[in-house]
Image (cartoon, rainbow, N blue to C red):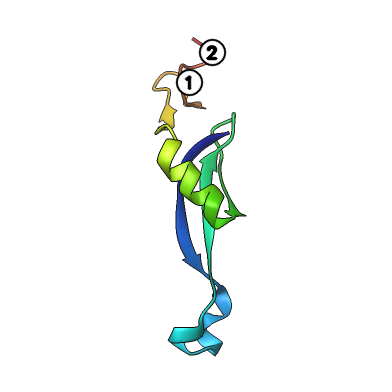
């Protein structure tokens, strides 16, 4: 898992609530080993820890084979 960042998000049902009472939480955005993008809910403490110590990763695309990779293309 390659963490990108944890950010504050709001629930989808906030349209039915007053803006002052909408529920908020933290989501972690990350890439898996295949280079696919995912997100999941995390606690406030874990979100702070991720933002403080996470290394920044960028998914690249190989110009020769078109496969996504993070460190180096597995085919070359």
At 39% from the left and 33% from the top, the residue drawn is: 56
Residue 46 at x, y = what percent?
Answer: 55, 48
Residue 54 at x, y = what percent?
Answer: 45, 36
Q: Is residue 69 above or below residue 38?
A: above
Q: Is residue 76 above or below residue 48?
A: above
Question: Farthest residue toward the front?
Answer: 45
Crowd tier of the residue under label 2, counting other residues whose Cα lies within 10 Å: few below 14, some 14–19, many 20 or above: few
Determine which of the numbered discs, if any, sits on residue 75 in the image: 2
29 or 24, which is in the foreground? 24
At 56% from the left and 38% from the top, the residue drawn is: 36
Q: Quadrant of residue 59?
A: top left
Disc number lying in front (2 or 1): 2
* Picture quarter with the N terminus: top right
Residue 31 at x, y = what percent?
Answer: 53, 38
**2 or 1: tag closer to the N-terminus:** 1
- Per the model, the C-alpha gap separating discs 2 and 1 is 8 Å
Whether residues under marks 2 and 1 lie with C-beta atoms below 8 angstroms apart, the answer is: yes
Residue 19 at x, y = what percent?
Answer: 44, 85
At 50% from the left and 38% from the top, the residue drawn is: 3
At 54% from the left and 33% from the top, the residue drawn is: 35
66 or 74, which is in the foreground? 74
Q: Secondary structure at mark 2?
A: loop
Determine which of the numbered discs, if any, sits on residue 65 in the image: 1
Q: Is residue 20 above or below residue 44?
A: below
How many tags in the picture? 2
């Amino acid at each position: 898992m390659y963490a990108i960042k944890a950010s504050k998000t709001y629930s989808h049902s906030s349209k039915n609530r007053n803006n002052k009472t909408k529920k908020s939480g933290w989501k972690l955005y990350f890439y898996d080993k295949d280079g696919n993008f995912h997100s999941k809910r995390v606690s406030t403490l874990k979100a702070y820890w991720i933002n403080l110590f996470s290394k920044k990763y960028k998914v690249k695309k190989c110009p020769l084979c078109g496969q996504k990779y993070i460190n180096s293309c597995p085919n070359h």
